[in-house]
């Protein structure tokens, strides 16, 4: 969500409220809520806390117009972490095994290849268009 108006509208709808219900709880008119959601005006600074409570979010979350991480974001973060960890582990493994003279050239190239693939996948997933 890009702005506070979109955030208010989304959270209100998520709670199954219509504008007049939110307006009643906030002691404002439904026209005021409509203006907030269309970004024609903003809630008064003194009412932000009450609005956040009604919408069941923190004031910070409401003002930053962002949602807490959802399950997909967490899974993506875990996948990114795994890709980076495997790439690092392969690199360290090649170095350590090489120092100990416990790895042949073919195995070294395979491990480095795996590391490069992991880094490539990470970069492809996280590239900004």
Image (cartoon, rainbow, N blue to C red):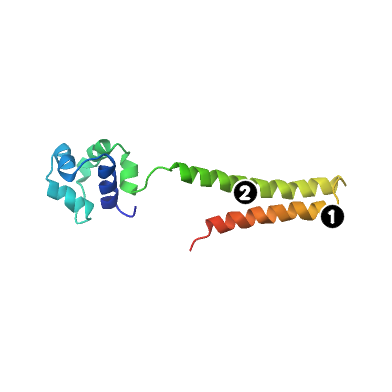
Residue 26 place in picture, x, y as percent: 17, 39
Q: Would you say 61 lies left or right of 35 here?
A: right
What residue is disc 1 on? 105
Residue 61 place in picture, x, y as percent: 34, 43
Residue 105 place in picture, x, y as percent: 84, 54
Front-most of residues 79 and 57: 79
- Of all residues, the one furthest to the front in this rendering is 16
- Of all residues, the one furthest to the bottom in this rendering is 129
Crowding at mark 2 (Cα within 10 Å: few <14, some 14-19, many 20+) = many
What residue is disc 2 on? 83
What residue sits 57% from the left and 46% below the top? 79
Res. 60 image quadrant: top left
What residue sits 64% from the left and 55% below the top? 119
Q: Would you say 111 lies left or right of 44 here?
A: right
| Element class at badge 1 | helix
Count of residue discs: 2
Marking on residue 31: none
What residue sits 76% from the left and 46% below the top? 93
Front-most of residues 12 and 96: 12
Q: CA distance from mark 2 to mark 1?
A: 23 Å
């Amino acid at each position: 969500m890009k702005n506070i108006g979109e955030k208010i509208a989304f959270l209100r709808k998520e709670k199954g409220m219509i504008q007049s219900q939110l307006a009643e709880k906030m002691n404002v008119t439904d026209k005021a809520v409509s203006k907030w959601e269309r970004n024609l005006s903003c809630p008064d600074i003194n009412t932000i806390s009450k609005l956040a409570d009604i919408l069941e979010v923190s004031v910070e979350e409401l003002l930053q117009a962002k949602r807490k991480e959802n399950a997909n974001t967490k899974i993506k973060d875990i996948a990114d972490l795994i890709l980076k960890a495997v790439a690092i582990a392969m690199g360290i493994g090649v170095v350590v095994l090489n120092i100990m003279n416990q790895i042949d050239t073919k195995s070294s190239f395979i491990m480095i290849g795996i590391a490069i693939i992991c880094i490539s996948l990470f970069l492809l997933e996280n590239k900004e268009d």
